[in-house]
Image (cartoon, grey):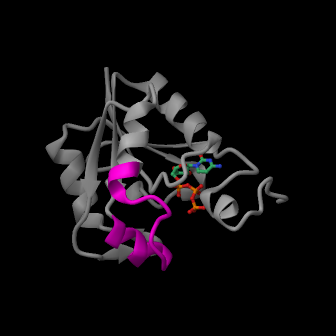
Amino acid sequence: MTRILTFGTFDLLHYGHMRLLQRIAERGSHVVVGLPVDGIVVAAKGRPPFYPYAIRREMLLHTRYVDEVVPHDGEVDGIGRIRLVAAKIALVRELGIGEVAMGDDWRGDYDFLKPHCRVVYLERTAGISTTAIREARYPVVD
Ligand code: CTP
């Protein structure tokens, strides 16, 4: 079966994350999360995560869906919203990844990986996000 990789901050782990990880786990035998280190989160989102890397990693490993968490770090290059293009390609190759799976708010953004592995976008869960929780806007009114 396939080794699957997904990328994301996964801060303040919530049911949108869990539903995505559950569906990813059903698609393969080994689920790896490429988890951005705190400095990369700052570069991408403009502020540090609520939980630092070590806690975000620990919580992902407490779920039944994640087999491995690897640090996602490197030079902050980018294509549009995507950071660390070279680091993403390197992880796919080094880890023997057959598929990268992302929520569909990223549709198209990971297509640059298609020469290296399958790329799929799974439906995002409406009405929940880390940002909404941090800003005390839960439940989200879209
Ligand atoms: N995700 C999802 N459904 C949600 C929220 C996130 O399927 N309601 C998915 C994203 O599409 C992504 C992964 O979970 O593939 C990690 O997303 P992340 O950016 O960490 O979560 P958000 O809640 O979107 O965080 P933020 O508000 O900081 O953007």
Q: In the image, residue 19 lies at what x, y percent?
A: 60, 35
Q: In the image, residue 86 lies at what x, y percent?
A: 23, 65
Image quadrant where residue 85 sits: bottom left
Residue 126, placed above or below residue 51:
above
Lateral position of residue 116 relative to residue 45, left or right: left
Q: Nearer the viewer, residue 28 or 133?
A: 133
Identity of the residue drawn at 19% across and 37% down? 96
Lateral position of residue 41 relative to residue 134, left or right: left
Q: Quadrant of the C terminus?
A: bottom right
Which portion, as a residue range, is magenta?
A: 38-55
Residue 111, placed above or below residue 134:
above
Identity of the residue drawn at 44% across and 54% down? 8
Q: Nearer the viewer, residue 60 or 6?
A: 60
Lateral position of residue 6 relative to residue 2, left or right: right
Identity of the residue drawn at 25% across and 64% down? 73
Q: Nearer the viewer, residue 42 or 54?
A: 54
